[in-house]
Amino acid sequence: MLQLYLKSVSLKKQIFQRWHRLIITLEKSEHNMIPKDEIRALLKDIENERVERTISTKNTDKFARAVCAFANDLPNKRLPGYLIIGAYDDGSLNGLKVTDELLRNLAGLRSDGNILPQPALMVEKFSFPDGDIAVVEVKPSKNTPVKYKGTVYIRIGPRRGKQMTKN
């Protein structure tokens, strides 16, 4: 009986070690959010087909339309799009203090059922001397068109628009 117990403990230890190695491997290989110095460069540059800035923290429809447009990647750049919350159009920060609630709401855009197919996105807080920003990084979707509440949104330069479809 003791031998069986020791084998069980040994097996559990092996399983734990394998899972631990797998988790570390996944953490190393996972896509990381854009580095802070690149965020600074995006703030200094003009809005374009890959960048949208806003000071609004409550306009979920605006956020979802931007996520949808970035996921559709109409210019076919195959690069992520960035929704930056807490910055004016000129790139200056508005002194926002990003909360956990805001980050949860932004992350929830992916799975609330309004954007289909679900986009691949990451949400992160960045702190600067002038305030925080929340950044939503949206990867181009392989399954287009991506729709928000049944409507396809696209981005053309700094403007976002609806794509007219017959469906």
Image (tube, rainbow, N blue to C red):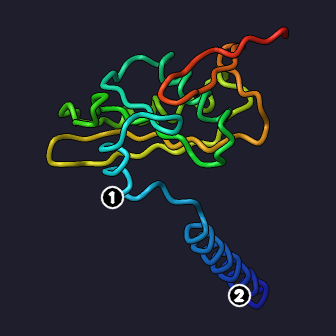
In this rendering, is residue 166 above or below 41? above
* Position of residue 133 in the picture relative to residue 71 (left or right): left
Q: Which residue is mark 1?
A: 37
- The single residue placed furthest to the right in the displayed view is 167
Q: Which mark is residue 58?
A: none
**CB of mark 2 within 8 Å of CB of mark 1?**
no
Q: Residue at x 31, y 51 (%)?
A: 40
Q: Residue at x 43, y 31 (%)?
A: 52
Q: Residue at x 15, y 42 (%)?
A: 130
Front position in the image: 11 or 120: 120
Q: Position of residue 69 (x, y in %)?
A: 60, 28
Front position in the image: 46 or 2: 46
Q: Residue at x 70, y 21 (%)?
A: 147
Q: Earlier in the sequence, mark 2 or mark 1?
A: 2
Point out the image quarter for the C terminus. top right
Point out the image quarter for the N terminus. bottom right
Q: Position of residue 131 (x, y in %)?
A: 19, 40
In this rendering, is residue 18 above or below 157? below
Type of residue at label 2?
Leu
- The single residue placed furthest to the left in the displayed view is 129
Q: Secondary structure at mark 2?
A: helix
- The single residue placed furthest to the bottom in the displayed view is 3
Q: Secondary structure at mark 1?
A: helix
Q: Which residue is mark 2?
A: 6
Which quadrant of the figure has residue 110? top right
Q: Position of residue 54 (x, y in %)?
A: 35, 26
Nearest to viewer (mark 2 / mark 1): 1
Type of residue at label 1?
Asp
Label 1, residues with CA under 10 Å away: few <14, some 14-19, many ≥20: few
